[in-house]
Image (tube, rainbow, N blue to C red):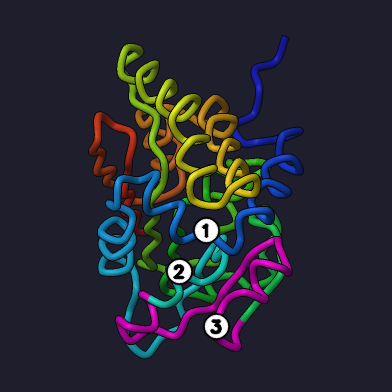
Amino acid sequence: MASRKPGLQEKWRYVFDSLESIIPIYAKGSGRIALFSDTRMRTQTVQFAARKASLVLDLGSGPGVMADLVAAAGGEPVLLDASRRMLSAARGNNKVQAVFEYLPFRDGAFSSVVSGFALRDSRDLIAAVVEVRRSLSTDGRFAFCDLGKPDSFGKAVLLGLYLRLVVPVIGALTGGKNGLGFSSLYDTYLLTLTNGELARLLRSYFALVELDARDMGGSIVVSCVA
């Protein structure tokens, strides 16, 4: 039996609908779930990849949390998301509705690509990584922060328990019934690659890959150079 391809695959629509349900509380709920480390992680991502006075592709932009940091750093964000509702909630004029696996840009269109807590939501992770690499110019930079999955089985189980039992409570306290949409984090966690597996995958496509893991490996900031 063939091994399962990395990515959400058949779970993609369920996670997509869950994310749309939390748009009004996305920033507040995400911050609480990440124990308020999300802004620091996003800032580290932007500082590595974004270049002043240049277009910066924000992959899986959501309601524009990362794009605001890109703009503050002097870059011009291009927001890309599969959800029209997410894009409508974001500021800015450069918005593109598309999925990660089919980026509607020419080869080498960007010198910078960033993503905040979104890459693991790819339907097909390998196809998404290939498309990011194709859209990057020579020596272009790709950086993202995301939920990590520890290589240690014990740590992975502990983090899974947090996502399964605690996150729904945080979501409900933040946004009531709609806040339960954050429960899909556990589903994406079950399907995501371990940090080591993810690093090995990325090194197949990028010349330089550095993965900074923290919080027992449950939070990662990844920096790549094409």
**Magenta stretch: residue 144 in it?**
no
Mark with earlier residue (3, 2): 2
Q: Residue at label 2?
A: 65
Q: Residue at x 29, y 52 (%)?
A: 36
Q: Residue at label 1?
A: 26
Q: Quadrant of the N terminus?
A: top right
Q: Quadrant of the C terminus?
A: bottom left
Mark with earlier residue (1, 2): 1
Q: Residue at x 31, y 61 (%)?
A: 39
SS for tag 1?
A: helix
Question: What amino acid is at disc 1?
Answer: Tyr
Find residue 63 and report its image quarter: bottom right
- 225, above or below 72, in the image: above
- 8, above or below 117, in the image: above
Q: Residue at label 3?
A: 91
Q: Residues within 10 Å of mark 3 (few under 14, many from 20)?
A: some
Question: What amino acid is at disc 2?
Answer: Val
The residue segment tinted magenta is 69-94
- 211, above or below 59, in the image: above
Question: What amino acid is at disc 3?
Answer: Arg
Q: Residues within 10 Å of mark 1 (few under 14, many from 20)?
A: many
Q: Residues within 10 Å of mark 2 (few under 14, many from 20)?
A: some
Question: Could you give the CA–CA distance between mark 1 and mark 2, rounded to whole angstroms?
Answer: 9 Å
Foreground pick, 103 / 12: 12
